[in-house]
Amino acid sequence: MSLKGKTLFISGGSRGIGLAIALRAARDGANVTIAAKTDTPHPKLPGTIHTAVEEIEKAGGKGLPVLCDIREETQVAEAVARTVERFGGIDICINNASAIQLTGTLETDMKRYDLMHQINTRGTFLVSKMCIPHLKLASNPHILNLAPPLDMKAKWFKGHVAYTMAKFGMSMCTLGMSAEFASAGIAVNSLWPLTAIDTAAIRNLLGGQTVAAMSRSPEIMADAAHAILTRRSHEATGNFYIDEEVLRAEGVTDFSKYAPGAKGALAGDFFVPDEVFARTETKVTGLF
């Protein structure tokens, strides 16, 4: 199956994993709305909604840049309305936008706590809520949350309980909405990487160049997302997918292209259950 002619609504997406997913869909000839906050160049972060759309259209798709803070209900409603007006509907909702701060309870100020919960949990709920009426009209509708498996071990909370609560809130949206909208044929799934992914968050917050050198490129998440989004929505919902496992199920055996410069073990990502690491064929170190 192809995403040709499908319309994706992506929160965030001006860089990193969200942009990689957009470009993979664009190569099929998809329509993509980039709903994000970066309208003008950021001094420390690459890309804007406008440069993302330029890349989408060069890749063969059609793009719509929408300045949108997903904490604001009216802005999300307007972004969805503009998408439907431009492309005629919405087939796929990608909840990609996220905020992170890995600090302990006493070190986490409430402004940052609120930001993480408003973007991660509330934003995922709100964007999904606004897209669902349109997804109900689509032929193979999907919601894909970039959120981890619900592995309720204390080690994932210790040290950064506020972030984990906010991120697992996205996962609970997957758990609940997949059951709630199963009869409507809307697939609701999560996708999470086995290893660290070389993004601005890694380079600026989570270890810099050292960890980036032990990471895979965002394209592995894009390829895994494409595999999920082209599955029949009635048959693939309520799953907490891991990128490498998705691609192995598709017949991929060589993952070297996603980390061409890596030497030795790759950095394992947060929130990956122990049993997933145990069954992987990839050499991974428990850096996180």
Image: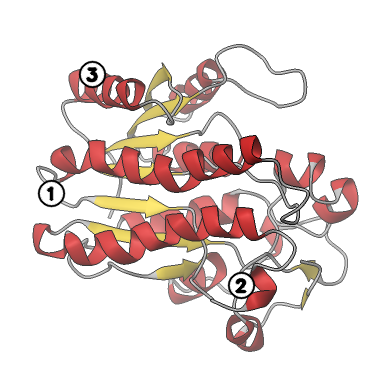
Q: Is residue 44 above or below residue 145?
A: above
Residue at x 17% of width, y 59% of height:
181
Residue at x 39% of width, y 62% of height:
172
Secondary element type, mark 1: loop
Quadrant of residue 175 in the image? bottom left
Residue at x 31% of width, y 69% of height:
238
Q: Is residue 242 above or below residue 212?
A: below
Residue at x 24% of width, y 36% of height:
130
Q: Are marks 2 and 1 in contact (CB under 8 Å)?
A: no
In three-dimensional space, the C-alpha distance between marks 3 and 1, rounded to whole angstroms, equals 18 Å
- Specify the amino acid type for callout 3: Arg
Nearer-N-terminus badge (2/1): 1
In the displayed structure image, the side of residue 101 where residue 67 appears, left or right: left
In this rendered view, identify the residue nearer to me: 67 or 278. 67
Neighbours of disc 3 within 10 Å: few (<14), some (14-19), many (20+): some
- Specify the amino acid type for callout 1: Ser
* Foreground disc of the pair 2, 1: 2
In the displayed structure image, the side of residue 101 where residue 276 appears, left or right: left
Neighbours of disc 1 within 10 Å: few (<14), some (14-19), many (20+): few
In this rendered view, identify the residue nearer to me: 48 or 245. 48
Nearer-N-terminus badge (3/1): 3
In three-dimensional space, the C-alpha distance between marks 3 and 2, rounded to whole angstroms, equals 38 Å
Neighbours of disc 2 within 10 Å: few (<14), some (14-19), many (20+): many
Q: Which residue is mark 1?
A: 139
